[in-house]
Amino acid sequence: MANNAKIGLLRWEKGHVPVGLMQLEALKGNSTNAESYPFPVDMRHVEGACTETIINHPSQEVCDRFIEIGKEMQAEGIKALTGSCGFNAIFQKQVSEALDIPVFLSSLLQVPFALQIIAPSKKVAVMTAYGSSLTPEHFGYCGVNDMSRIIVLGLENCPEWNSIFEKEDEPVDMDLVEKEIMGTALDAVKEHPDIGAFVLECTDLPPFGPAIRDATGLPVFSFSTMAGYMALMLGELNLY
């Protein structure tokens, strides 16, 4: 177990990574950047876990690998398990049922909490890399069965953000990426003044969370806030 870590993180498989994603992963706050955590985290790659098997066509075989590696980590002393992509929500129920430790596979798990702390007339805006792929099923596995108070904000139509995946071997303009993310959030608030909170599904977005919070004046939940819950729960962080 890496550095006596209490938290384990399941990463997607090793392989070719778009240059733009490497730029995002280098930002402090990204789920796969070890510098994002003021405590040790044991990160392990899951063979076969990728966009195709998690987002496009969720694979039972990959889910079984999540469970297998999770059990190994549990046996080695890991006390809580998370993942490196919010779309892992599709496996949340199966993995949590198979393990004896807390499982936090997606920041979408915070949506029910966000809904409870804002007025019933308010809505939660969920920002994601692939809006068309984020389905009620993902939310259902995270405890949300009524989508009437959910607004999904996809980034796939943002040109510079989209170039990360369309031009995999070319770097992106990170300042422009940030402007697109911020523009998406601010446009959403203008179009939907009843937004009461943001939840960032994508684990590449936490570095931009503080700017969204400051610009909108609204609470922002992300992978980072979820990791904070885990750390506080396990005593890796203390408030007193």
Image (cartoon, helix red, strand yellow):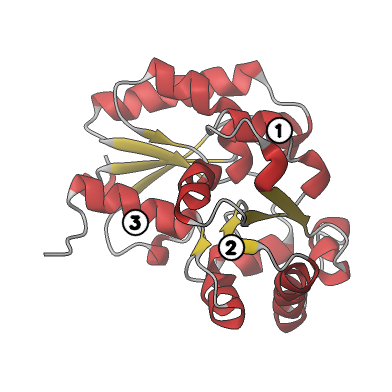
CB atoms at circles 3 and 1 under 8 Å apart?
Answer: no
| SS at mark 1 in the image | helix
**Residue 148 appears at what percent x and percent y?**
71, 42
Q: Amino acid at mark 1?
A: Pro
Is disc 3 surrounded by few (<14), some (14 to 19) or many (20+) residues within 10 Å? some
CB atoms at circles 2 and 1 under 8 Å apart?
Answer: no
CB atoms at circles 2 and 3 under 8 Å apart?
Answer: no
Of the pair 100 and 120, the residue shown nearer to us: 120
- Figure quadrant of residue 100: top left
Residue that mark 2 sits on: 196
Q: Determine whether 61 is above or below 8 in the image.
A: above
Number of numbered discs on residues: 3
Residue that mark 3 sits on: 228
Residue drawn at 71 percent across, 83 percent down: 175
Q: Determine whether 89 is above or below 156 in the image.
A: above
Of discs 2 and 3, which sits in the foreground?
2
Residue that mark 1 sits on: 136
**Residue 146 appears at what percent x and percent y?**
65, 34
Q: Amino acid at mark 2?
A: Gly
**Residue 105 appears at what percent x and percent y?**
49, 38
Of discs 2 and 1, which sits in the foreground?
2
Q: Amino acid at mark 3?
A: Gly
Of the pair 42 and 96, the residue shown nearer to us: 96
Of discs 3 and 1, which sits in the foreground?
1
Side of 157 where 105 appears, left or right:
left
